[in-house]
Image: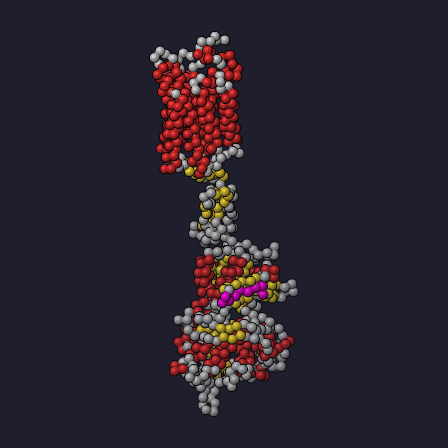
Amino acid sequence: MRKSGDVILGGLFHSHLFSHFPDLSFTSEPHQLSCHGFDVLGFKQAQTMVFTIDEINRNPNLLPNVTLGYSLYDTCLTMAIGFGAALSLVNGQEEQIILDDNCVGNPPVVGIVGDSSSTRSIAISTVLGLYRVPMVSYFATCSCLTDRQKYPSFFRTIPSDAFQVRAMIQILKHFGWTWAGLLISDDDYGLHAARSFQSDLSLSGEVCLAYIEILPPDNDPVEARRIVDVMKKSTARVVIVFAHDSYMINVMEEVVRQNVTGLQWIASEAWTAADVLQTPHFMPFLAGTLGIAIRRGEIPGLRDFLLQTRPDLYHNNSMVHRFWEFTFQCRFAPPPAGWVEGGGALCTGEEDLELVATELLDTSNLRPEYNVYKAVYALAYALDDMLQCEPGKGPFSGNSCGSLQALEPWQLLYYLERVNFTTSFGDQVSFDENGDVLPIYDIINLLWLPDGRTTNQKVGEVKKSAFKGEEITIDEEKIFWNFENKKPPRSVCSESCPPGTRIVRKKGQPVCCFDCVPCSEGEISNETNSVECISCPEDFWSSPQRDHCVPKKTEFLSYQEPLGICLTVTSLLGTFICAIVLGIFIYHRSTPIVRANNSELSFQLLLSLKLCFLCSLLFIGRPRLWTCQLRHAAFGISFVFCVSCILVKTMVVLAVFKASKPGGESSLKWFGLMQQRGTVLILTFIQAAVCAAWLLSSSPTPHKNTQYHKDKIVYECVVGSTVGFAVLLGYIGLLASLSFLIAFLARNLPDSFNEAKLITFSMLIFCAVWVAFVPAYISSPGKYADTVEVFAILASSFGLLVALFGPKCYIILLRPERNTKKAIMGRGTKP
C-alpha cells in the first residue's frame, strides 16, 4: 500500500496469518513466497496508519506545506518477509520505481512504524540501528529491546514486557495468589517474559511459579497433552499465559478434550482480545479470564474512514481487494478456475460493508490501532520539530538544522527522542532514555453473556507515573469469576502460617512451599519476617498462642499472698506481745523480779525484740533499693542490740553471784550501770560500722532474676558483698555464742530463779534457728529465701521472748507470791 509524498513513512503490518515457503531444492527456479489466511485486524491496523497520515496532512498546524506519504508492507507474520520488507523500505529499492518529471524515484523512508512481533523487531532494529533509522513499534513488547547499545533507534508506543510482568505480579499479589503456573511461547516474546518473571519473583519472594512450560509453535498433540497433564497435577489454580493466540489454540483444544476446569487464566496482551479464542467452544473454560490489555483509546473519524474502504476507491490496492473477497466470500473477475462452477459468487464492488459483521468497523475497542495512531504522530511531531529549527540555532554540527531536501534519518532520531505531545484522547506521549513510553495497561475480564456473545470488560488498570511509581486499581465488584462460588480461587502452595508459628522451607521446593513450626517459648511470630520468630523483650514472655508478648509474671514475697499475710500477722503479733510485756514490766517495775538484774536491760531487750519483729517486714513486698539496703542493716543491728543486751545480762548475773561470795565484791565495780550501757552501745556500734562499710562499698540492690523461671521475673535483693553479709551474720553468731557459753557456765548457780538457765535455753533456741537458717537460705530460690530469713527472724525472736520473759510474766501475773526478794534469793518458803 503506497502513497507518494514529500516525506515517506514506512509501515510493517500483517494482513495474512500464514505464509508458504517455496521449494529451495536448487534444482529449479523458486517461486515467490505466498501468504494466505487473511487477518482483518492486521489490515485494520494498516488502514489506521493510512487514516492517521491523511489526518496529519489535513492539519494546517502540523507539518504545514509538507505532505506525508506512506509505504506499507505485509509481513505475513514471517521473519523472511518482514525483514526483506524493512530492507526494501530503507534502501528505497522497491519492486517498482515510479519516476517523476525530474527523473527522481520514490525517496526512501525516514522512519518505520512496526513491527508487531518482538522477534522480527529485534532482527530489523539491529540493522536499522546501524544507520540510525527510527523504528516505532506498536506491538513489540520484549524487554530486551530496551537495550540502547543494541537497538539505538528503536522506540515503541506499547509498554515493555518488563512492566507487563510486574503488572501481572501486582494482580497475583492483589488476590493473594502465591502459586501459579506459567505457559510461554517458544519465541523472544515468551522466553524473555519467563526470564523477567523469574527475576522479579526472586526479588519479591512473595509469588512462586509451580511450573514453566513452553508451548509448541505447531500442532503437536502429544506435547499439548503433556502440558495439560502438568496443569492438572499441579496444585496451582492460576495459570499465566505469555504467548500469542496461535500458540494457545492447540493447548485449549486439549483443555477442552480433557475437560480441565477450575483454573483461573491470566492472559498477556498478545491474546487477551483474540477473537479466535472467544468462541462457544472455548468460553466455558476461558470465561472469567483476567487479561492485560493495551490501553484503549478513541480515534475520532476512524470509523467513517474505514467505511470508505472500497475497491472502486483503491483500484491498485491488492490488500483492499483481498479484504473485500474475505469479507463477502466472493471473488473478483477473473475468478479462480472452478469458482463459479462450485457455486461461488463474483464480487461487484457494490457490496455494503455495514450489512456484514466485520471487525474492521468495530472502533469501540481500539488498542493496537491506538498505538499505531500514536506512533505515526510521534514521527510527525518529531519531523515538525525539526522543521521548526531556526538556522544557526540547530542541535547539529555548527549549530545547523536538518532540512527537508537533505533529510537524514539520524536527524529525525534526535528529535524523536525528545518528542512530547498529547493525543486527542488526552494521553501524553513521550519516550524515556530506553525508547519506552510511560507505561499503562488496562485490566480486562472476559465475559460470556447469556446470549452466547463474548465481551471484554475493563475492571482496572496498572500504570506507572513519574511521581507515584507503579499503581494498580481493580474494581472487584465488576469481575466475573468462572467458579461455582463466584469468588476468586485460592492458589497457594502452602497456607499462611498462623500466628505463633514460623516458616520452615521445604528442601528442594520454591520458597512458597513450607511447613509451619511453632515458635519457641519466649518467642512470637514475626509479622515482617515470617521465617524467624522474634524474642520478647526482657520483661515480657510469649502468650500461650505465641502471637504476642505479655508481661512476665512477677514473683516476690508479697503482702497480698497468703504466705506474706501470715508472716506479716506473725511479725505484728510478736511486736504486739513485746509491747504488752513491756507494759507489764513498766507497770510492775518496782517489783523484785523486774528490778532484779537491771530492769533497764530488760526494757532495752524488749525494745530490741520489737525492732527484730518489725525488721522482718522489710523482707516482705517488692524489693526496692532502700528496702534492700535497709533490711539487712536493720536486721543486723537489731539482733546485735538484742544479743548484746542478753550478753550483758548474762555477765551481770555471773558477776552478782560472784559478788555474793566472800571477797567477790570487787567484781561488781566492772558491771555498773554505765558500764552495762557502754558495753551494749559499743557492741551495737561495731555492727553498725560493719553495715555502714558494707553499704558504702557494695550495697545490696534489687535484682530481676530470670534464671529460676523463663516466664517469670523473681524480684530479689542481691547482697552485693558476700563478705559483708558473712561478717554481719558472723558477728551476731559470735555474740550469741559468747552469751550461750557464759550462760551455760552460770546455769547451776544457787538461786530459786536463776536467769542464766533461761538465757542458756533461749540462746540454744537462737543458735539452733540460725544454724539451720544458713543451708536453708542458700538452697532456697527467690522469695523463698526471703521467707526462710523472715521465719528465722521470727522464730529466734519468739524464742528469746518466750524463754526470757515467759517465766517472769507467769510469776508477775499468776504467782505474785513468788515476786518477792526472799523468794527470788531462795530464802522464802516454796509453795
Is residue 167 among what the camera can see?
Answer: yes
By secondary structure, the bulk of the magenta-drawn segment is best described as strand
- Counting every numbered tag in the picture gives 0
Q: Nearer the viewer, residue 542 or 505?
A: 542
Q: Is residue 546 above or below residue 795?
A: below
Which residue: 35% across, 11% down? 662
Q: Is residue 70 magenta?
A: no
The residue lying furthest to the top in this view is 829
- Residue 604 is situated, as x and y percent measured from the top left of the image, at 45, 24
Magenta residues (range): 458-467
Which residue: 50% across, 31% down? 564
Residue 405's quadrant in the figure?
Answer: bottom left
- Residue 122 is situated, as x and y percent measured from the top left of the image, at 43, 71
Q: Is residue 649 above or below residue 317?
A: above
Side of 290 where 769 appears, left or right:
left
- Residue 460 is situated, as x and y percent measured from the top left of the image, at 57, 64
Which residue: 35% across, 14% down? 664
Q: Is residue 459 magenta?
A: yes
Is residue 54 among what the camera can see?
Answer: no
Which residue: 53% across, 77% down? 49
Q: Is residue 712 above or below residue 232?
A: above
Q: Nearer the viewer, residue 33 or 828?
A: 828
- Residue 783 is situated, as x and y percent measured from the top left of the image, at 46, 33
Residue 639's quadrant in the figure?
Answer: top left
